[in-house]
Image (tube, grey):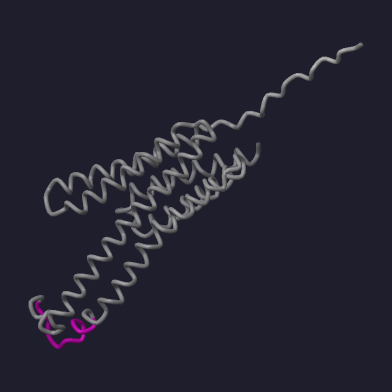
Amino acid sequence: MADFDTGRTLGLVGSILVLVALIFSFIIGFLGFLLQLVGLILILISLHTFSNIYGERIIFRNALLSVLIGYGVPLATLIFLFILLIPIGFTIVTSARPIPPSRIEDLFGAQITASIILWAFIAILAILVALAISAYLWYRALNTLSLRSGEKFFRWAGLTYLAFAISLIVGVVTAVILVGLLVIFIGILLGLTSWVLLAIAFYEIKPPQPPIQAPPAPVVQV
């Protein structure tokens, strides 16, 4: 059971690293992102190991897609917005005197300003959709592992992460009112809880039991 012990250890360490990175992200800054990335890689290796052990490739496949969508789409969207806003920043920086916000629309025209606002809205929508898809795939991966291993904490970790994503989406949509900020705060707590539950799941998971072989049928002598 060397593979099982390795997968269990990697998953436990990875979950703890992600949890620590999220809690102290405001303190350690970019180092927290790197720590979270290392933790996710360890978890993916762990889930790949368990996919082979239980013969369920969909566990690793859903988890990998979840991470790629959850991180790839927001990163690509932010890069796109950065490229889109370069002309405005360049004009403001190279201007002989500071440009008040009220003059920016005069410089670029109402149509361009409205286009930037529209693209920003589309970017936020894309990130929220990516978050929902990523959370659902993550839940599918952990729920399948829960069914195959018999460890219920995997399912609870997936459900809690799905609730985190839903809370965050609802909070962002309703952020114009105070209740939206409260929902976002609750979502953040749910997100942290999901990683705690995942660490518990990796700690509590038991090795698969070999199938019970029936005793050989007695030989009847004639």
Residue closer to the observer: 41 or 114:
114
Q: Residue furthest bottom?
A: 96
- Residue at the extreme top of the image, as rendered: 222
Find out whether residue 96 is within the magenta segment.
yes
Where residue 111 sits: x, y (%)? 15, 80
Q: Quadrant of residue 89?
A: bottom left
Q: Residue shown at 33%/44% (left/top)? A: 191
Residue at 35 percent across and 49 percent down: it is 22
- Where's the C terminus, which quadrant? top right
Q: Is residue 173 left or right of residue 142?
A: left
* For residue 122, side relative to residue 104 (left or right): right
Tell whether 43 sits left or right of 122.
right
Q: Quadrant of the N terminus?
A: top right
Q: How many marks?
A: 0
Q: Is residue 43 above or below residue 85?
A: above
**Part of the protein shown in magenta:** 90-100
Residue 94 x, y percent position in the rendering: 20, 86
Name the residue at 49% across, 43% down.
13
